[in-house]
Amino acid sequence: MKSNHVVKTLTAAAVAVVFFVSNPLASLANDGSKKEKLSDEQVSVQYIGSTADQVAFRVEFENPTAEKFWLIIKNDAGDVVYRKQFSDVHFSKSVYVQKEEADIRPTFVIRNNANEIVRQFAVTSTITESTVVTKL
């Protein structure tokens, strides 16, 4: 009876040691880094102007953990036209999108390992002609 109690105690102690040791190992399995969830407030994409053949946007991203992230820009068809990785804490970049037609719909994506924030725009160009008649 006494040996049965000793076996149960040793088994319980072994299980406790396994849980104690495996818990820190499991938390390091993801490289020990925290995955930062993105929020809408961290990302800003604003129209800043245009020329005859380009539209300019300002992309800003507050990245307090300096985690690596991707800036991805897609065209109307969903094709990736720009993709680059950054790790800036206070990211700010002017982006110029080619106007191939009167209407374009660029999509901006900020993506880290945890998730992504998407901003979509519709840009419509209208040409106005002005006619002035002067009596001579």
Image: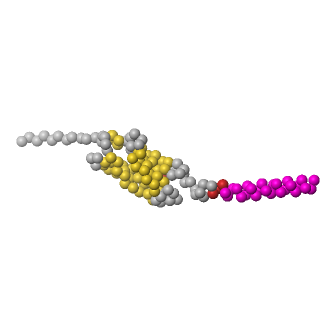
> Of all residues shown, which one is farthest toward the right?
1
Q: Position of residue 31 (x, y in %)?
A: 59, 57
Q: Residue at x 60, y 58 (%)?
A: 32
Q: Residue at x 46, y 52 (%)?
A: 70
Side (left or right) of 28 relative to 10: left
Task: Tell me: 99 left or right of 45.
Answer: left
Quarter placement of the C terminus: top left
Whether residue 64 appears in this view of the structure is no
Q: Position of residue 111 (x, y in %)?
A: 49, 50
Residue closest to the far left: 136
> What residue do we see at 48% from left, 54% from top?
69
Quarter occupied by residue 17: bottom right
Please tell me which residue is depicted at 43% across the width and 53% down the height of the picture. 84
| Residue 89 % position (x, y) | 47, 60
- Asked if the magenta segment contains residue 102, the reply would be no
Magenta region, residue range:
1-25
Principal secondary structure, stretch drawn in magenta: helix
Q: Position of residue 67 (x, y in %)?
A: 51, 57
Left or right, 34 with reference to 72: right
Residue sitting nearer the eye, 42 or 98: 98
Q: How many marks?
A: 0
Q: Is residue 2 magenta?
A: yes
